[in-house]
Amino acid sequence: MKLKNWKIYAFWIALSLGVGGLSGLLSRGGVEAFEQNAVQPPLSPPGFLFPIVWGILYTLMGISAARVWLTEPSLARSKGINLFITQLVVNFFWSLIFFELGAYGFALIWLLILWVLVAWMIKVFFKTDPLAAWLQIPYLIWLTFAAYLNAGVWYLN
């Protein structure tokens, strides 16, 4: 990372963390009720682990987006950034749908849409900056695990 680009990295990381943080803040009451009342599937991690994992993932997402932003302007770059913003918006609403509304089935559909958007974004990122694409792989893996958890909660509740 070039020193002159630190503001771009800071912006994209802050945007990613901010969206995730706001979503978490808005769904905090639903999370507490969920943890007390919902039957969770096997392999469900303890609640304290989620903010740690998401903090790391949002940071990687921000670094990845900054790397793409810093590439030469192109159709692939524009498409990649648009996909990044779109998936970030979809990501924001998943917690509200799942925790606040308790709409587990709809949340699973929403999560599958998010998974497709992230996979598509990774494919486009590979065209502009392969490392940026690789930085998104842990996110896609976590979304896959989250889909298992979401489906399990829906089935058990």
Image (cartoon, grey):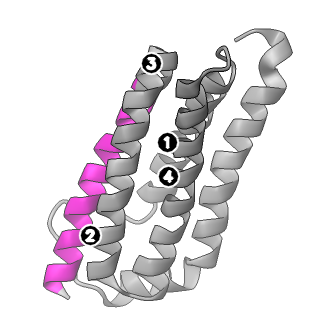
* For marks 4 and 1 on the same chain, the one whose residue lies earlier in the sequence: 1
- The location of residue 148, given as percent across then percent down, is 20, 61
Secondary structure state at the residue bearing disc 4? helix
Q: Amino acid at mark 3?
A: Lys
- The location of residue 101, given as percent across then percent down, is 44, 88
Residue 22 - label: none
Task: Identify the residue at image location x=29%, y=70%.
Answer: 109
Secondary structure state at the residue bearing disc 1? helix
Q: Amino acid at mark 2?
A: Asn
**136 magenta-colored:** yes
> Mark 2 touching mark 1, by CB under 8 A?
no
Q: CA distance from mark 4 to mark 1?
A: 13 Å
Q: Magenta span: helix, strand or loop, mainly?
A: helix
- The location of residue 153, given as percent across then percent down, is 22, 77
Residue 57 - label: 1
Residue on which disc 3 sits? 127
**135 magenta-colored:** yes
Residue on which disc 2 sits? 150
